[in-house]
Image (spheres, rainbow, N blue to C red):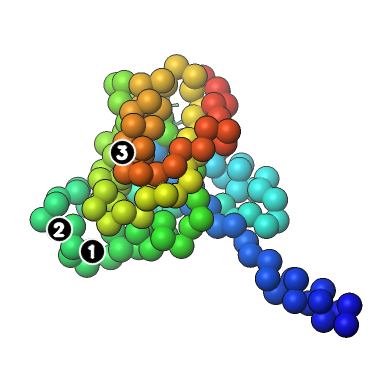
Amino acid sequence: MGKTKQLKMTSCQTTIQILAISGSLRAASSNTRLLQAAALLAPKEVEIKLYQNLGELPHFNPDLDDSKISAVLDFRNQLKNSHAVIISSPEYAHGVPGTLKNALDWIVGSGELVEKPVALFNTSARSTFAQASLKETISVMLGRIVEEASVTFSVY
Ligand SMILES: Cc1cc2nc3c(=O)[nH]c(=O)nc-3n(C[C@H](O)[C@H](O)[C@H](O)COP(=O)(O)O)c2cc1C
C-alpha cells in the first residue's frame, strides 16, 4: 500500500521547463554564459533549456505571420512547451538588440508569451534602457514579469 502511494507520487512529479533566451549572438556572450550557468545550477526539478536559433529567425513581416516558416514554428513551439522564460540581453545604443526584438515581434500575434512568467536577467547594471524597454514590450504582450526572479549580475 505504502509502495503504491510512493510510486503514484513519483509519476505525478513534473519538471518545470524554462526556455532561456540570450539577446546576444556573440560566441563569448556574458548573457549566454549566465543562462548556461543558470541551467547548470538549476534544481533537479527545473530544466532550463537555451534557445539556440535567435540568429536563424527571418526578419519579421506581418504578411508572413501565418505562414509555416520552420524556424518561427520551432520558436513558438519551444515557448508553448515552456512553463516560463528567462531573457538575458545586452543593450545596444540604449535599446534592445534587433535580433531579440525581431524574435519577440514574431510572437505578438501568436501569443506564446500571454500569461507566461518571464524573468529578465542582465549582465550590466548600466543597461537600464534595454531592460526597461524589454519590460514594456513583454508587458504589452501580456507576459508576466517576475520581479523577484529578475536579477542583474554585473560583469561590466
Ligand atoms: C554596438 C554596441 C552597442 C552598445 N551599446 C550599449 C549601450 O547603449 N549601453 C550599455 O550599457 N552597453 C552598451 N554596449 C555594451 C554591451 O551591452 C555589453 O558589452 C553587453 O553586456 C555585452 O553582452 P554579451 O557579453 O552578452 O554580448 C554596447 C555594445 C555594442 C557592441
Figure quadrant of residue 71: bottom left
- Give the amino acid type for the residue marked by disc 3 in the picture: Val
Residue 90 drawn at (x, y percent): 41, 30
Tell me if residue 141 comes above or below residue 10 in the rendering.
above
Identify residue for label 1. 69
Q: Earlier in the sequence, mark 1 or mark 2?
A: 2
Please rate how many residues cluster around mark 3, counting C-alpha atoms within 10 Å: few if below 14, some from 14 to 19, many from 20: few
Classify mark 2 as within 8 Å of ligand 1 or not, answering yes or no: no
Residue nearest the observer in this picture, 17 or 111:
111
Residue nearest the observer in this picture, 114 or 118:
114
Looking at the rendered structure, the secondary structure element under dot 1 is loop
Identify residue for label 3. 140
Residue 56 drawn at (x, y percent): 30, 53
Mark 2 and mark 1 in contact (Cβ < 8 Å)? yes
Cα distance in 3D space between marks 2 and 3? 22 Å
Residue at image point 61% right, 42% down = 37
Residue 57 drawn at (x, y percent): 27, 52
Cα distance in 3D space between marks 1 and 2? 8 Å
- Give the amino acid type for the residue marked by disc 2 in the picture: Leu
Residue at image point 33% right, 28% down = 133
Identify residue for label 2. 64
Q: Left or right? Give the position of 86 relative to 24.
A: right
Q: Earlier in the sequence, mark 3 or mark 1?
A: 1
Labelled disc at residue 127: none
Cα distance in 3D space between marks 3 and 1? 25 Å
Q: Left or right? Give the position of 25 relative to 42.
A: left
Answer yes or no: is residue 94 visible. Answer: yes
Q: Quadrant of ligand 1?
A: top left
Mark 1 and mark 3 in contact (Cβ < 8 Å)? no
